[in-house]
Image: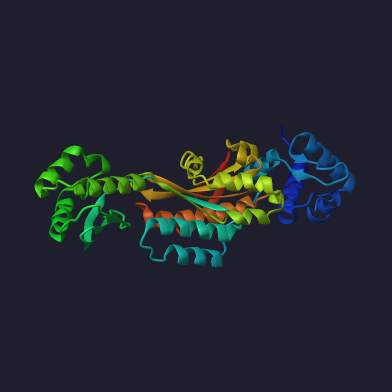
Amino acid sequence: MEISQRKKKILAAVVDEYIRTAEPVGSKTISQIAGLGCSSATIRNELSELTALGYLEQPHTSAGRTPSPQGYRFYVNELMERQRVSVEEAEAINARLSEKMEQLDKLMSGAGKLAGQLTGYPALTLSAPRAATIKRFDLLYIDANTFIIVVLLGDNTVKNKLVHLPFSVEQGQIQKLSALFNAGFTNIPEESITPVLISATERAVRDTMGLTSIIAAYAIEVLSESRAGAAFVTGESSLLQQPEFRDPDKAHRVISYLSDSDHLMHLPGAADGNPVRVIIGPENVADELRDSSVVMASYDAGEGQRGLIGVVGPLRMDYSAVAAKLKYIADGLSRLLGAGEAPAGFGKMIVKGDTWTDEQQE
């Protein structure tokens, strides 16, 4: 059903004021801020009709109105003004994303922390699964019963493990294994580390104590973890600062959900190539998020993979500002990790359903 321009202005005023104050909005307030040029009685009638249509809710008989999930969806799709990040915010984002980080997980957690600081909501970053390989092995001899396995992955991530042995081993044996692993186990995927390769290495070094299997098992473990992708969450406690989550049980449900990386890895990303997706309240599949909104931005992680960065917050969220900040961070991650240079600025933001697309500026 088409709603009139006046109803649209009133709905937008209610959403904007409720975002600002977290308090139900009355007709008197709307008449002061909306500039409609009509009486409070007319505004009250329009509020009643918007409530009947499902766009607004009335917590109490004498109280003002609050937006419903349907009202937020209409606001996001048709009414809100698209924002851009400020010059100061852009400089802060670029500075943080340009910091030299030795490991990808530090970059992901750092980007999530930045998103949380800029939006004031719990933030999450999902790194894309990637085809991991090991570039180099270093086996460091400590003593007759101890050595360290150090592996350098293809993305320059370094992993290590301290190995304690129930038997003695000579330093020369560890050095031979290091040479053979660098010759036969580097620059290959996890599935290529087969029993046949392990057995051939054992025969070549005359390993009868299982050292080759110990090192190969750790290599498989590291490659499997690196290939799976990862979820990073930061700022969960900021949810407690929102009026909607002062109920400890309500906040606990959301925070518990965010603490489970398996849940997060199944969050829906942006669809059809659109960079930002907004999921409002009941649109969320998970029951724990039915009273929350999720905004996700997609970034190019390279090698044809996409990652996600997003925030979880109340329905009373400044969607335009949040979307602009997340997209800017996602563009920065695409420049660092992806195949091509992402645009430095934004085009006009167009909403289609629950996603944003860009339209190049004139």
Residues 130 and 302: in front is 130
Regarding residue 73, the answer to whether it shows in the image is yes
Measuring from the top left, give residue 235's x and y in whole percent.
57, 56
Labels in figure, total: 0
Q: Please indicate whether residue 2 sits to the left or right of residue 104 in the image.
A: right
User: Is residue 82 visible to us here?
Assistant: no
Q: Position of residue 1 (x, y in %)?
A: 71, 32
Q: Residue at x 13, y 59 (%)?
A: 172
Q: Where is residue 346 in the image (x, y as percent from the top left)?
A: 51, 55
Q: Vertically, is 290 above or below 37?
A: above
Q: In this view, does 132 lie to the left or right of 57?
A: left
The structure residue drawn at horizontal position 20% and vertical position 38%, both measured from the top left corner, is: 195
- Please give left or right for residue 290 compared with residue 114 in the image: right
Considering depth in this image, is 287 or 347 the residue closer to the camera?
287
**Would residue 54 appear left or right of 76 to someone viewing this image?**
right
Q: Position of residue 178 (x, y in %)?
A: 17, 55
Colouring chosen for the image of the structure: rainbow
**Residue drawn at the location 74% of the way across and 51% of the way down:** 18
Q: Which residue is at the front of the view, 343 or 100?
A: 100
